[in-house]
Amino acid sequence: MTILAKKDPDETLLEHTENALKVFKSIKEAYPETPFICGVSDFWEHLFYSIFFHDFGKAASGFQRSIYGGEKWKYRHEVLSAGFVSGLEYENQSREAIALAIITHHKDISYLREKYRTDSNPLAKNRYIEKLQELTPNFEELREIQQKIPEISEKYLGFELNKFREIKSSEEMVDSYTNSIRPYKKKLDNEELTALHGKYGIFLKGFLTACDHLASGNKYNLLPGIEDMRAVYSFSELRKTQIKALETKGDAFLTAPTGTGKTEASLFWSDANQNQCKSKRVFYLLPYTASINAMYKRLQKDFKDPELVGIQHGKAMYYLYRSFEDEDYLIATKKAKKVKNLTDKIYRPYKIATPHQILKSMFGIRGFEQNLSEMSNALFIMDEIHAYDAHITALILETLKVLKSYRANFLIMSATLPSFLRELFKQELGITTEISFTQAELDEFTRHKVSVLKGGILDNLKLIQKEIDNNKKVLVVCNTVSQAQKIYRSFSQKVHNSALIHGRFILRDREEIESKLDNLNLLVGTQAIEVSLNIDYDVLFSEPAPLDALIQRFGRVNRKGWENKVIKPVYVFDQGSEKDKYVYKNQELVAKSLELLSKENILGESRIQTLVDEVYSNGYQGSDLASFEMVKKNFSTYHNTIVPFINEREKEDEFYKLYQSVEVVPIQFKLEYLEEIENKRYFEAMKYVASINFNQYKKLQHNNQIQIDSNMIFVSVEYSSKFGLLLDSDESIKGIFNNDS
């Protein structure tokens, strides 16, 4: 009987091994610096042996019977596979490393210690010996495969390996748990860390997992990046920042106004920093889901090959499912999973993601070894870096410092980054290159006339109505959802081509609103419109906010005004609502911003950096400073506790607390949601999900407005497709919900 690695379709052990080694060959070509980064000169030999033996335990007769339709085999094939390192003629650490990579390629050390601990559990030891005997019926075939090592290593590694003595029977195999996991864990507990507890172990585990998973998905080569980015964006004339980006090697800052071709410049930079075989992975990081989805769609179109670009954020699976939604649910789900799974592997050369996707790896969450391996020598484009609070900014900075030790390069982009933060990033990351326009060049992009108006937004509704009556496309930005709902209520009956956008809509309605954002007479929103949404309005009315946030709001008006030298008005009210202090805790920044803007008229683009620096002349203050310094102080100690082969389940909880949001379903959709769940139509069920922050959740819980069913939180709160969740007790708004659902 031929040893099978898997069924449907049949794939023999030798076929799967060779398929995984095809991926290995592609990874070796794509990541030539790995031995130098991890400090192990014969790293590729060790990885070859890890892959070669990773599934040998599947030869056990019980496992083979289960593949051929028998009862489930209740053991781990990796525990047996790792025993074949007995034949390796290496020193102990190398054998231990290869065994560890094999034994943990599906389950981590914590899981194995709990269920397969042969060093102190007689029952587990006897079970291991019993399962080891199951290899005997198929050992002749295993010997034949072992004898192919010189030939196969020549084919995939590039030279013959001869550091292996053939294992002829299970009696010659050592207990891999006792000989690899126990010493590794003991050294960890005694703080006697070795290379195996660092990059060496990370790369070994990460690349083995990638080879196994990609081979199982019938993908045997990593896709290379774009051959010539200049051919993709064949503009007749390039902007100065784009020319400089094409010439810049290494890390850089790029500062440019919204709408001046930063995206193309960043991709030109990635081209300039590629290696000869175009194998460096490119991560384009953005703060918000809507902008990530838009960039994903755009690059798929620009690159003319959807396989090259992947998307990673918390709701990526849902977004991908929606792109296949015209098909049968099961087919659409299967396609979405396939696209997502390949994106999560080291396969696609370009990934559009949130910074949370790279922060994950710093918390030791399952799969972090593969993620970090992929990110070695990668190119990171950090867009809209100004959009994060002090806590996340510090986490990003510390994460980039770790990635620098993996020889990654960074392009950090913003239209409004305070100089104190730029200098901090430059100093900590050793960035010396700045790509920007001169003052005169910047002023060519001037497009706004700014006015600070007395009073609050509710006092000036007639002024807003006047602009609408003059056929202007009007944008109104509030600081809180409740205020935005009030303002929209004032206009929704009178202005038919209008919409409200904020973070408390269910996914179905949020998508519907986002699909028509640029075609409205009136859009009322919150900070949701500040970053990366490709919208263009004629006039802005905004509640007061810190200057960098206001500049982002201004950027949604008259985006291409410089082309025809058109100036359009942006208005900022000098009073906000009572709840603004919870959104912008440092109200001094807001006051200082208004004071400076009140002295401006035509807001020259070259003035913006000066004004932002004046607002932030003292850097972070108060709770922002405390939060930033806390991360800076504790990060390295914390990160140094993360070691390969062990998933940090407790730290996973800590990571997800960073999101500070809770997914809920409005009570009116409970039956629809539960019906979709019952029918296993999970992505259809997600359409009814909205997000609220943790404090709002606790308040609803306190008021007995929470129900939990089928692991979902249902909130007894009124909901409207036009207004979203109404969490605040404004009866004047609630009254219209009865006529609008």
Image (tube, rainbow, N blue to C red):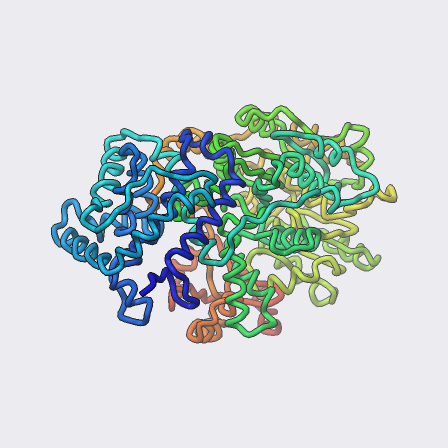
Quadrant in which the C terminus appears: bottom right
Please indicate, yes or no, whether residue 705 appears anywhere in the rendered image.
no
Please indicate, yes or no, whether residue 504 appears anywhere in the rendered image.
yes
Question: Total marks drawn?
Answer: 0
Query: Which of these two is toward me, 590 or 530?
Result: 530
Query: Which of these two is toward me, 33 or 690?
Result: 33
Placement of 483 over or under 683, stated as above or below = above
In the drawing, does residue 67 fall left or right of residue 260?
left
At 80% from the left and 41% from the top, the residue drawn is 447
Location of residue 454 in the rendering, given as x and y in whole percent from the top left corner: 71, 43
Placement of 193 over or under 177, stated as above or below = above
At 69% from the left and 47% from the top, the residue drawn is 542
Placement of 327 over or under 571, stated as above or below = below
Picture quadrant where residue 516 is located: bottom right
Location of residue 346 in the rendering, given as x and y in whole percent from the top left corner: 50, 48
At 56% from the left and 56% from the top, the residue drawn is 503
At 29% from the left and 67% from the top, the residue drawn is 66
Location of residue 15 in the rendering, given as x and y in whole percent from the top left corner: 42, 57
Quadrant in which the N terminus appears: bottom left
Location of residue 609 in the rendering, given as x and y in whole percent from the top left corner: 69, 30
Give the residue at the far right of this rendering: 564
Query: Which of these two is toward me, 353 or 715?
Result: 353
In the drawing, does residue 194 fall left or right of residue 606?
left
